[in-house]
């Protein structure tokens, strides 16, 4: 009986990024049926995966989490009622499989009796033919049960997949096709945001109705009460609030993925979590938004910060998937807000965040190679974009070029950790000693073709102009160019 798995689960089972699985499908190395991978095909392409590979999967996850260098949520078991419902659902599948097997064994017994009847009434030739057929049938059934060398591995993989399905369930968003996993006690909304998928929401606590989506298939369970009342027509349509429900089974939901124009301007009263001096020129300001008023933004956008009358615009350096935590890089200069950060701002001090602004955001549906170029402290939006791309696992490969403008590559270790943790990520530090044309040339010359790439570059206008014209001349599509002058 074929057993099909969705791509995200395949990626988890074999410990590879989803983008790598997509590349293999694209290059015809792995075949799919209706977007799913058959278990036998999986074993053909990954002959060495075993149950023990779960340890490897966890190891890779740990390296990645360390590389992110930030709070990654605790891997918790789902709530016991959710767990019970998931086990019940799995039990139903198990019962259905048992019923089917019982039916098949009845069919085999019936066939056996019928063959005996034919033998009794036929001549010697019929007797021989029936004996041969019965022997073949017995041999095939025995082989399927005892001698199939892949049987044990298929069983182990099925068992592993069942555990994954109990611990975490998959949500597919239509029509965008994004997929994410819900783990522990997360609501659908929390899991979507952790995965970096910008679905629409407002209060996060059941009051505004902005997170309402349609359930296309699957089962959900209410885990938080909500005051927002759904109309009868909405309930009949299958609508539910993502901030109040968790999935019991894999889900398909219908929801809009927000672009830069869909996110409203907000004013968020945050608090300083820490001021981290990265080097003598740059400080990382870590802010924490209130639980009831998280900042909605897309990677690559900037905000206006104000504290005690001092104000300044800064790009967010963290991923929107980091929940309430927001990181910004502040350069030591004469601007009042920068002076405030370096001279007096401390833990728990209030900082108001207004925004987000800007359209230097990642294309969420692009599966192409991505080249990131950052000049000096223009690394902040690039870091946010990279972390977002990593959490979405969409890009085929990622290449980062960070040019030292004299302020130092103040998070060089983080970039090296990314390169260590991700097979599809490369990092090249550069310095600004050569002119802009030469710098652009030294970056572009490392790529034989740019026809299937996207470039995200942040820095001075003359560097961006040199990069853009050089990249277009090398086959980059105009739609693949994303530049932010800083
Ligand atoms: S975000 Fe407001 S009800 Fe869910």
Image (tube, rainbow, N blue to C red):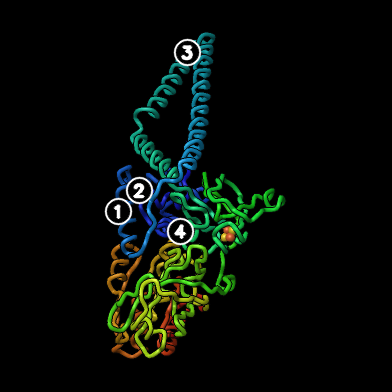
For the residues labelled 1 and 2, the Cα–Cα distance comes to: 18 Å
Q: Nearer the viewer, mark 3 or mark 2?
A: 2
First of labels 4, 1 by sequence position: 4
Question: Is 412 above or below relative to 180?
Answer: below
Q: Residues within 10 Å of mark 2 (few under 14, many from 20)?
A: few
Q: Which mark is residue 127?
A: 3
Q: Nearer the viewer, residue 27 or 313?
A: 313
Crowding at dot 3, Cα within 10 Å, few <14 / some 14-19 / many 20+, comes out as: some
Q: Earlier in the sequence, mark 3 or mark 4?
A: 4
* Residue 92, x across and y down, in percent: 52, 33
Tell me whether the residue at label 3 lies in contact with that at label 4, contact meaning CB atoms closer than 8 angstroms.
Answer: no
Q: Which residue in the structure is indicated by mark 2?
A: 46
Q: Are marks 3 and 1 in contact (CB under 8 Å)?
A: no
Disc 1 marks which residue?
59
State the quadrant of the C terminus: bottom left
Q: Are marks 4 and 1 in contact (CB under 8 Å)?
A: no
Question: Between tags 3 and 1, which lies in front?
Answer: 1
Q: Nearer the viewer, residue 453 or 386?
A: 386
Classify mark 4: helix, strand or loop.
helix
Residue in the image at 70% along x and 53% along y? 231
Residue that numbered label 4 is attached to? 26
Q: Residue at x 41, y 26 (%)?
A: 140
């Amino acid at each position: 009986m074929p057993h099909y798995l969705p791509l995200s689960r395949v990626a988890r089972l074999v410990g590879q990024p989803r983008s790598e699985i997509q590349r293999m499908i694209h290059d015809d190395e792995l075949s799919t049926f209706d977007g799913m991978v058959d278990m036998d095909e999986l074993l053909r392409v990954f002959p060495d995966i075993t149950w023990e590979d779960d340890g490897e999967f966890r190891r890779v996850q740990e390296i990645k989490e360390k590389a992110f260098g930030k709070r990654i949520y605790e891997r918790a078991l789902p709530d016991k009622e959710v767990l019970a419902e998931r086990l019940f659902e799995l039990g139903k599948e198990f019962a259905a499989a048992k019923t089917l097997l019982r039916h098949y064994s009845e069919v085999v017994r019936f066939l056996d009796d019928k063959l005996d009847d034919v033998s009794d009434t036929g001549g010697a030739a019929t007797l021989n033919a029936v004996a041969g057929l019965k022997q073949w049938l017995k041999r095939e059934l025995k082989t399927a049960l005892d001698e199939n060398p892949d049987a044990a591995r298929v069983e182990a993989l099925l068992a592993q997949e069942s555990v994954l399905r109990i611990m975490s369930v998959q949500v597919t968003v239509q029509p965008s096709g994004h997929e994410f996993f819900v783990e522990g006690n997360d609501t659908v909304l929390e899991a979507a945001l952790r995965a970096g998928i910008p679905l629409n929401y407002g209060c996060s606590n059941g009051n505004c109705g902005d997170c309402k989506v349609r359930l296309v298939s699957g089962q959900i369970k209410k885990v938080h009460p909500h005051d927002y009342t759904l109309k009868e027509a909405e309930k009949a349509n299958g609508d539910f609030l993502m901030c109040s429900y968790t999935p019991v089974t894999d889900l398909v939901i219908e929801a809009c993925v927000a672009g830069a124009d869909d996110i409203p301007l907000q004013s968020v009263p945050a608090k300083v979590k820490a001021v981290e001096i990265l080097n003598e020129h740059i400080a990382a300001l870590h802010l924490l938004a209130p639980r009831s008023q998280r900042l909605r933004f897309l990677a690559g956008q900037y905000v206006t910060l104000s504290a005690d009358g001092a104000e300044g615009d800064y790009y967010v350096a963290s991923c929107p998937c980091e929940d309430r935590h927001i990181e910004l890089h502040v350069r030591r200069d004469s601007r009042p807000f920068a002076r405030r950060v370096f001279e007096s701002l401390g833990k728990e001090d209030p900082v108001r965040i207004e925004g987000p602004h800007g359209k230097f955001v990642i294309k969420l549906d692009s599966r192409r190679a991505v080249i990131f170029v950052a000049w000096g402290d223009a690394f902040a939006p690039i870091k946010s974009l990279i972390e977002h791309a990593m959490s979405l696992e969409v890009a085929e490969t990622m290449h980062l070029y960070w040019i030292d403008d004299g302020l130092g590559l103040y998070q060089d270790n983080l970039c090296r950790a990314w390169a260590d943790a991700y097979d599809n990520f490369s990092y090249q530090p550069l310095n600004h000693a050569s002119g802009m044309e030469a710098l652009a040339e030294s970056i572009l010359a490392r790529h034989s073709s740019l026809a299937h790439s996207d470039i995200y570059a942040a820095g001075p206008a003359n560097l961006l102009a040199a990069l853009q014209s050089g990249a277009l001349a090398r086959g980059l599509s105009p739609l693949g160019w994303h530049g932010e002058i800083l």
